Image: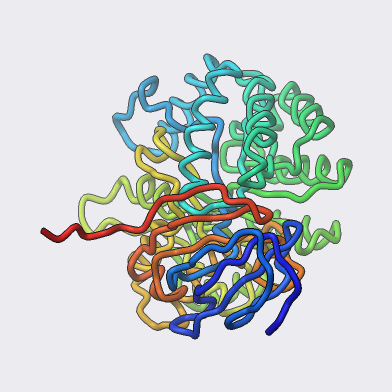
């Protein structure tokens, strides 16, 4: 293929599992051509070294505001209730600069791990006020050169009993929040909580994202309320839910029924492997349940599913390096997946499928934004199996990180 010019030409990359080498030409921040041995006049050429190129990881569910607070929390029980309680106490002391510093630390790790898009929840209530929200708005602006950050104004500790939270959420939605999030299981009236969150979403024209059914009781659920409101308000395709760990305690036929309900209502699902594994099953002294919603099964039946980070170094998850590649590998291990098509689907859950959940385009194609990450692997399946390392990346055609490829130094 012959072209006239390009700002950047990335040569010798894979774009499919074990496929032939391709070149990617970039002009004015967009992909202008993809093909073998492109001939053009390029300002800069880069050797892709046979690495696998894709459009970058998408973290559809993370909490930047409360990351890296282990030094100010006590973990004795390892339960969800304790995590909510300890974090609530800690966030009263958050100030804008403190949140900014901790969030920046996490965002920078995410970028060099190959993530170039994320949705972060930010708690807005009388304890945190709008301090965390203001900090994350600055993060969104300051790191826009490398990552697109979507802010979800979030009611972590209930809504129906706190009118001040409602007012603060409205203020955040007027001042730059991209969508609204709720947590029915912490509210004294979960159904009313769901309804009020939808009310806010409709007034401000935003999408909705709920933390839902975070336990192992298959009969304890707010899912019907979410599905009913989604359909009644014509919100299909604009609603997502996270956790739903009680799906792991249901019989397969019941899971398929719920898959049909979610698919028909256009409700997407995010699984948070590290947090779900850490917090669930605490009352079992042997054969501890995994507590992981079967995203791969739901995906087979038309549900948009993703795998995401959730929390980093706090009482909800006292671990984390913000690597979605590691998260995909963890999910595949815990879900006991081995078939190539299932492994490839998991790769999509931290990439294209996660972007679809956020209603954003994703992929390498002529005319698409030149958001490109090179992984040290042979393709999506190999990436998940081997936790393929992100070597370097570009955002809008400008390089944003460089990790270097490992070299063995023989004597």
Q: Is residue 252 visible?
A: yes
Percent position of residue 333, x then y: 33, 67
Q: Is residue 190 visible?
A: no
Quadrant location of the N terminus? bottom right
Out of 214 and 202, give the one closest to the viewer.
202
Out of 145 and 233, give the one closest to the viewer.
145
Q: Which residue corresponds to the image point at 49% horizontal and 63% vertical from the top-left?
A: 374
Q: Residue furthest right?
A: 203
Q: On the rendered structure, is 375 left or right of 4?
A: left
Residue 298 occupies which quadrant of the picture?
bottom right
Q: On the rendered structure, is 398 left or right of 274?
A: right
Residue 50 occupies which quadrant of the picture?
bottom left
Measured along the vertical axis of the image, is residue 398 above or below residue 183? below
- Identify the colour scheme used: rainbow
Out of 229 and 66, give the one closest to the viewer.
66
Measured along the vertical axis of the image, is residue 333 above or below residue 316? below
Out of 314 and 167, give the one closest to the viewer.
314
Percent position of residue 92, x then y: 55, 16
Percent position of residue 350, x then y: 53, 61
């Amino acid at each position: 293929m012959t072209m006239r010019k390009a700002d950047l030409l990335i040569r010798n990359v894979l774009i499919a599992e074990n496929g032939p080498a391709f070149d990617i030409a970039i002009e004015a921040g967009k992909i202008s051509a993809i093909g073998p041995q492109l001939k053009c006049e390029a300002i800069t050429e880069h050797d892709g070294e046979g690495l696998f190129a894709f459009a970058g990881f998408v973290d559809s569910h993370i909490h930047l505001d409360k990351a890296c607070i282990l030094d100010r929390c006590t973990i004795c029980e390892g339960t969800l209730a304790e995590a909510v309680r300890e974090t609530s106490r800690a966030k009263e002391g958050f100030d804008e600069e403190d949140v900014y510093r901790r969030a920046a630390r996490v965002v920078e790790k995410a970028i060099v791990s190959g993530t170039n898009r994320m949705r972060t929840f930010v708690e807005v209530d009388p304890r945190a006020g709008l301090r965390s929200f203001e900090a994350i708005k600055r993060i969104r602006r300051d790191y826009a050169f490398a990552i697109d950050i979507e802010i979800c104004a979030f009611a972590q500790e209930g809504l129906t009993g706190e009118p001040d939270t409602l007012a603060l959420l409205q203020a955040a939605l007027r001042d730059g929040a991209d969508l609204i999030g709720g947590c029915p299981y912490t509210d004294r009236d979960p159904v009313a909580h769901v309804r009020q969150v939808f009310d806010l979403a409709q007034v401000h024209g935003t999408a909705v994202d709920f933390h839902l059914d975070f336990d192992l009781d298959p009969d304890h659920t707010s899912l019907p309320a979410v599905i009913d409101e989604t359909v009644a308000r014509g919100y299909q395709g604009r609603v997502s839910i996270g956790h739903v760990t009680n799906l792991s305690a249901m019989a397969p036929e019941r899971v398929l029924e719920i898959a049909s309900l979610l698919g028909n209502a256009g409700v997407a699902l995010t699984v948070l492997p590290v947090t779900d594994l850490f917090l669930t099953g605490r009352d079992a002294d042997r054969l501890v349940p995994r507590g992981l919603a079967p995203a791969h099964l739901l995906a087979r039946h038309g549900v948009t599913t993703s795998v995401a980070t959730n929390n980093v170094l706090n009482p909800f998850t006292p671990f984390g390096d913000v690597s979605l590649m590691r998260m995909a590998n963890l999910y595949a291990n815990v879900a006991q997946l081995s078939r190539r098509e299932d492994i490839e689907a998991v790769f999509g859950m931290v990439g294209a499928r996660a972007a679809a959940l956020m209603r954003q385009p994703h992929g390498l194609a002529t005319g698409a934004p030149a958001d490109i990450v090179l992984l040290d692997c042979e393709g999506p399946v190999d990436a998940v199996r081997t936790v393929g390392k992100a070597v370097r990346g570009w955002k809008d055609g400008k390089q944003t990180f460089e990790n270097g490829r490992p070299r063995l130094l023989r004597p």
